Image (cartoon, rainbow, N blue to C red):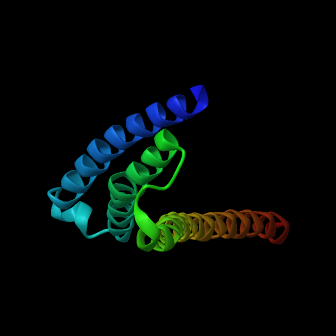
Amino acid sequence: MGAAVIASGFSILVIIVGIIGNSLTIVALVKGSPNLQSHATTKFVINLAVTDLLFCSLNLPLTTVRYMTRSWPFGTFLCHWYPFFFYGNVATSLMSITCITVNRFVLRYKQLSKLCNQLQLYLLDLYSSHSTSIMQRYTAN
């Protein structure tokens, strides 16, 4: 019984913090500057916050009651649909995190590619100026 009480307490804490935190995130990103809203990453983070808000407001309360009562008091209909919502929510969160990761990689790769191109041009310039000075030394004699 002690583990169920501890699990229920932590679930309630996560519900409260999750609803407040995700709601604030959504409001801040939706009401934020137009420059911020134009980024694809912002849309992915909003999607992740909405998914987590739904998880904290729908799935976690049902899980908390299940921990407290050690049974499923919500009937067979919700018993059959609960895994669909639970795993669908988890899959949507994972897809949002994956999209954020891929988006950040692409942005970093573009910056790295630009930096490598600049470095190549610098090295080419350095090589050509060095080669020219060597050639001038030997052809001047």
Is residue 98 placed above or below 1 in the rendered structure?
below
Q: In the drawing, does residue 135 fall left or right of residue 125?
A: right
Considering only vertical position in the picture, is 75 above or below 3?
Answer: below
Q: Quadrant of the C terminus?
A: bottom right
When asked about the image quadrant of residue 121, the answer is bottom right
Q: Which residue shows up at 73% across the image and 66% down it?
A: 127
Left or right placement of residue 34 versus residue 138 in this view: left
Q: Nearer the viewer, residue 14 or 33?
A: 14
Q: Is residue 79 above or below residue 68?
A: below
Q: Residue at x 42, y 51 (%)?
A: 60
**Quarter of the image where the N terminus is located:** top right
In this view, the residue in front, 76 or 57, is: 76
Q: Position of residue 138 (x, y in %)?
A: 85, 67
Report whether 126 appears left or right of 68: right
- Nearest the eye: 120 or 42: 42
Q: Residue at x 27, y 42 (%)?
A: 20
- Percent from the top left, x then y, of residue 27? 19, 54
Q: Is 98 on the left-hand or right-hand side of 37?
A: right
**Residue 96 coordinates in the image, percent (x, y):** 47, 68
Q: Which of the 4 image quadrants contains residue 49?
A: bottom left
Tell how many labels.
Answer: 0
> Could you tell me residue 131's position as x and y percent?
77, 68
- Depth check, front residue: 50 or 140: 50
User: Which residue reaches farthest top?
Assistant: 2
